[in-house]
Amino acid sequence: MILHILVNLNQPCGFPPVSNRLLIPADRLRDSLASALAASGACPTSVEAAVRALMHASRLGVDSHGARLVMHYDRVLRSGRVNGQPQIRVKHTGTSTAVVDGDDGLGHHVAYAAMTEAIAIARETGVGAVGAIRSSHYGAAGAYALAAAEAGMIGFATTNADSVVAPFDGAKSFHGTNPLAFAAPSGDEKPWLLDMATSSIPMNRVLLYRTLGTTLPEGVAAAAGGTVTRDAAAAEMLLPLGGSDFGFKGAALAGVATVLSAVLQGTALDHDMIPMIGGDMSSPRNMGHFFLAIDPARFGGREVFAAGMAAYLAALRAVPGRDGAEILAPGDREWRVEAERLRDGIPIDLTTAEFLGLSAYSAGEPEAPRR
């Protein structure tokens, strides 16, 4: 295996250009993540789900929710916050609805189980809506919406999270980053895919910038009292999507995630949730999620939907760009990043690489994860 030092990669999705990362082949990274999570006490099904979600994020350039989180999951598995051997249960509550009890397991395991159930219900009834309770951090929401699209469905996934985002004009955090993710099959093309935080950026990206010692973009985070800052080390909260002028839009969208993920099924509200980082690392967080799968065959029909998506995407991409800019559909940039990374390797920061045993070898099997 060849291990490359990555220098000054202009990474999309807000990843800063730095020189202290390694390029790791995707299969090597996947195997290393699986070994680390298994050593942390996760059962094989939980390992498979977590690796699938982490690799989704790392392949598509959502590095804040990718391989770097393996150290956090190792910690919460070992500390008892997350159950590595969950007994996940599904309770059907109606013709098209169900609730998945995650038994405080890894959120990725819970989320894929819930979306799988939503897809199965949608095949029978046209629409499957599934809530999840007693779960934990599940990484990138887009991974679960994508699972529906890959099954021929329109997919939606959301979760609330601990309070790190100020309300519009707020001086204290209230909502979580509360992502909304949608995906739709697009015939022979890669799926249409939207995965967005309702905050200006995800908090994990602030932590990533902090780790890398780089400056935040303008207008995405605030220090104590709500003062806007570009210093990742000083950032105590995020600003809602839309910034200082239109942040009321992002703040309201964050509420959509809270209503569906927490209020609807009685799990922890954002401002009452145990923080993801620091503090009590042994008590479960009782996170909630929400998933939706819609079968196009039960509406206009699969052929009508496929033709409509093709026409829509062709027309969208044909719109003239300002100053020669290329018009992209949601997901286009991510699929390009995935192709590049599968060809050239996935960038991993040195701290994560060392933890995974990927920093001190150039061939053969990786070293045991370091703790």
Image: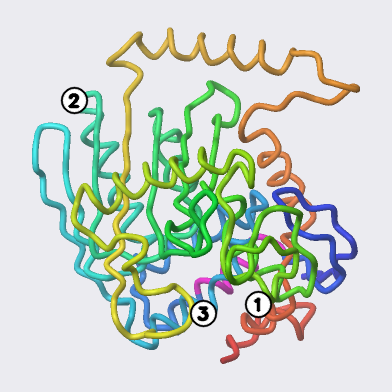
Which mark is nearer the camera, 3 or 2? Answer: 2
The residue lying toward the viewer, choosing from 195 and 355, is 195
- The image shows a total of numbered marks equal to 3
Q: In the rendered structure, which amino acid carries the disc numbered 3?
A: Ala
Q: Residue at x 63, y 46 (%)?
A: 243
Q: Dot 1 corresponds to which residue?
A: 352
Q: Dot 2 corresponds to which residue?
A: 125
Instruction: Classify 291 as above or below 269.
Output: above
Q: Residue at x 49, y 57 (%)?
A: 52
First in sequence: mark 3 vs mark 2: 3
How far apart marks 1 and 2 lie (CA) works out to 44 Å
Most frequent secondary structure within the magenta stretch: helix
Label 3: few (<14), some (14–19) or many (≥20) C-alpha neighbours in 10 Å: many
* Quadrant assignment for the N terminus: bottom right
Q: In the rendered structure, which amino acid carries the disc numbered 2?
A: Thr
The residue lying toward the viewer, choosing from 35 and 260, is 260
Q: Hey, which quadrant is residue 40 in on the image?
A: bottom left
How far apart marks 3 and 2 lie (CA) works out to 40 Å
Tag 1 and tag 2, C-beta contact below 8 Å: no
**Within the magenta stretch, is there residue 56?**
no
> What is the x, y in percent for residue 364?
71, 79
Instruction: Classify 230 as above or below 284.
Output: above
Label 1: few (<14), some (14–19) or many (≥20) C-alpha neighbours in 10 Å: many
* Quadrant assignment for the C terminus: bottom right
The residue lying toward the viewer, choosing from 108 and 238, is 238
Q: Residue at x 32, y 52 (%)?
A: 289
> What is the x, y in percent for residue 370?
60, 90
> What is the x, y in percent for residue 7?
90, 65
Q: Dot 3 corresponds to which residue?
A: 36
> What is the x, y in percent for residue 346?
72, 60
Q: Hey, which quadrant is residue 64 in on the image?
A: bottom right
Q: Which segment is the magenta one?
A: 25-34
